Image (cartoon, grey):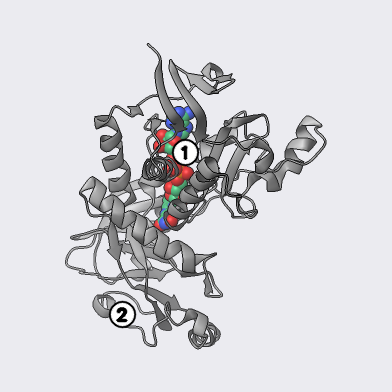
Amino acid sequence: MTQETDYLIVGQGLAGTLMSYMLQEAGRNSLVIDAGIEHAASSVAAGIINPVTGRRYVKSWKIDTLLPFARKTYTALEELLSCKLVFEYPILRAIGSVKELNDWLLRSADPEYERYLMDEADPGAYTDKIHPAYAYGECSEGMRVDIATLIAAYRDYLSQASRLLPMAFDHSQLELTSTGVSYAGIRAKGIIFCEGYRAKDNPFFDFLPFHGDKGEVLLVRIPDANFDKLLKQQIFVVPMGGDLYWIGTTYFRNWTTLLPTEEGRAYLEQQLSGLLKIPFEILDHRAAVRPTVRDRRPFLGSSPDAPQVWLFNGLGTKGTSLAPYWAAHLCAHLLGGSPLDKEVDIARFAHLRNRTKGVKGNHTSDNFFLPG
Ligand SMILES: Cc1cc2nc3c(=O)[nH]c(=O)nc-3n(C[C@H](O)[C@H](O)[C@H](O)COP(=O)(O)OP(=O)(O)OC[C@H]3O[C@@H](n4cnc5c(N)ncnc54)[C@H](O)[C@@H]3O)c2cc1C
């Protein structure tokens, strides 16, 4: 029997979950195909949103827009799924030298940073339990979103509505039709690929410069620590409730196994031992690959070969803040024809496809727009 839906979505990590949710909010159906691949990035991530990042303490790209949108979306999802997802935390940031402290103070004096950088840092429960850095800065508006709970709860939600196919997608079985696509007896107006770093093997988008940077994390118990803030001191210490903490992360550009490695574990364990004055116990060690992109901007758009085949990917290291806003942006483009922001439109890499396939001319997503 043939089944109909508005859109097929492949992958139910952060990207696929938010895409399905935004389509639903816009009154459209979707059916999600997910293989439940163990250790997808979304299930290993801490879900941190850190508004001011890097050695130069710069605001994350578009954070003034992304952060309130993310907060609003995840709060609405808490209500829909009846579970707690959003945990607001200040972020304590270790400062290693006089120069870094001067840089921090300069930023703090900038009115653009006023809402994010606090006048004084208070290490609170960390005092006496860690080897102190030269100084600390404190960032307000930090957040942890419980991504693992979100993905699991949304999966149940889809499953109960018979909108989840828990299976691996087989590209060779996809048929492009005059009205959209057909796959395993399901007809849809279009298909949206949200496969995380595995999209590098997607035949429609294999010209795009996916990187795929592996990260490893530890889940540890630190008895009676009562840490109530996120701490960034070489590594991130993230409270997960009770005595449980997420410790991360490594950043491997060149990797040969998807599994956690001895090297990754040793690095994290060494960093944590050097930081803490109190004992800890390692409960778990996990690894996943971030869907990173050369220019650090998401991938949105349709395939140059098939206007009904879409991509939502490239969430990189910051999926938690990026996914809600850009899923809504792609949804508005898909359904209403509003233009894609050029910074995220995959058309910016059209020259790479032209090079591999010998095609001449310009591809912009508008050329391939198919109304929803
Ligand atoms: C160690 C680590 C720590 C991180 N920490 C943070 C953080 O603190 N804050 C933050 O914002 N970001 C963080 N990130 C980044 C974040 O995890 C990603 O940006 C985001 O999760 C990517 O989501 P995604 O849906 O694109 O990909 P994924 O999470 O990889 O999801 C892809 C989904 O597609 C499915 N799939 C793939 N191929 C197929 C197929 N052929 N058939 C069916 N299903 C398929 C998989 O089962 C999976 O469910 C971290 C990443 C890592 C690795």
Q: Quadrant of ligand 1?
A: top left
Closest to the observer: 177 or 102? 177
Badge 1 is on which residue? 258
x 30%, y 36%: residue:
155
Instruction: Classify 34 as above or below 26.
Output: above
The secondary element bearing badge 2 is classed as loop
Q: Quadrant of residue 301?
A: top right
Structural distance between the alpha carbons of marks 1 and 2: 36 Å
Amino acid type of the residue tagged 2 in the rendering: Pro
Q: Which residue is mark 2?
A: 123
Q: Would residue 99 be found to the left or right of residue 322 on screen?
A: right
Between 181 and 247, the residue placed more toward the observer is 181
Residue at point 34%, 50% (across, down)? 147
Q: Is mark 2 within 8 Å of ligand 1?
A: no
User: Which numbered disc, 1 or 2, marks the residue that appears first in the sequence?
Assistant: 2
Task: Please provide percent x and percent y for residue 137.
Answer: 41, 81
Mark 1 or mark 2, whichever is nearer to me: 2
Image spot of residue 328 (x, y percent): 46, 50
- When the figure is inspected, residue 238 is found, relative to residue 365, above or below; the finding is below
